Amino acid sequence: MKEIHKPVMVDEVLRFMALKPGQVVIDATAGLGGHTKAIWERVAPDGIVIAVEKDLESLRFARERVEGDGVVFIHESYTNLGKITEFLGIKGKVDAILFDLGISSYLLEHSGRGFSFKQDEYLDMRFNPEEGLPADHYINRMTAPQLEHIFRNYGEIRFARSIAESIVKHRKRQRIKTTGMLNEIVLNSVPGIYRRNQKLKKKLLAQVYQALRIQVNKELESIATGLVEGLKVLKEEGRMVVISYHSLEDRLVKQLKKMRGVEALLKKPLTPGNDELSYNPRSRSARLRAYKKMGELNEEDIDHFTRLEWDNIGHNRPRFAYAVGKG
């Protein structure tokens, strides 16, 4: 498993979390445990690390990877950090929190849930297969305008309308169940250069899969809720580090600096250095932002942030995010 798991920007994460032995830390997106292990090594032997992960298989790998009496593994969403810390008796006592919002190599390549256009798999795309509805459901039930909205706003795709209309047309003949079927429909919906040019092809398909994954997992809504939950459980002077991987995430994370009681520790996000890019090319899109909790949070700010005022991050409010039509 080590071969497919390379935690991103570990040195930068540790530096801005400013960890010390004995501290209480949350890894809100534990994945396969790469960051969890590095964090535990900084706070051991008397510290506590709460490793939270929504995907049960990933959490099992993390448990095998990280050994330490002070590491607690929780199969749960980071949207419930308040409940988790209250149950553990550490609410308001957390020194630092990490959110690594990227999808792991394991989920892309080995989960069998259709996260990658490179594998021919069933279109599921759920982080937790026991929750919500699979991508198959949305693709085969949403109307063309709804699909267009998802592709345009969550994938920033130029040919959103054409792709949406092609999907609706195709599913009248045959239900779209696999990544292979979806790939073919998408590529037949756009100019031929996207089929001939590998770089353009990969970028387009990646945008389509990003859009669907965001829809299926309600990612932006979950991120907004999770970040606020994180701030609430932090102690004063506690630090939060967030790594995002695409512009929608980063625009949202950037809004934290506008909240009263929160101080941004960086004017601009950090990006991976050349050394890291050489051995971990997938880190190229990573953007790290860091914040410090300076005092009480303002309820108005929290309400504004969690309601996702999309105009503030360059997008319209997603009216169709959960509506499922008969198309």
Image (cartoon, rainbow, N blue to C red):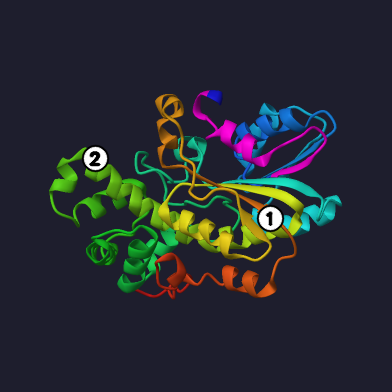
Q: How many marks?
A: 2
Of residues 246 and 104, the one drawn nearer to the viewer in this rendering? 246
Q: Position of residue 75 (x, y in %)?
A: 69, 47
Choose top left, top right, bottom left or bottom right for residue 170: bottom left
**Residue pointed to by mark 2:** 199
Which residue is depicted at the point 18% across and 47% down? 194
Choose top left, top right, bottom left or bottom right for residue 64: top right
**Residue pointed to by mark 1:** 230
- Label 2: which secondary element: helix
Q: Sequence-wise, which precedes: disc 2 or disc 1?
A: 2
Disc ID at residue 277: none
Residue lying farthest to the left in this orientation = 192
Q: Is residue 295 above or below residue 299?
A: above
Which residue is depicted at the point 33% across and 64% down? 152
Of residues 127 and 227, the one drawn nearer to the viewer in this rendering? 227
Q: Position of residue 44 (x, y in %)?
A: 79, 29
Badge 1: residue crowd in 10 Å (few <14, some 14–19, many ≥20): many
Is residue 229 on the magenta stretch? no
Residue interval drawn in magenta: 3-26
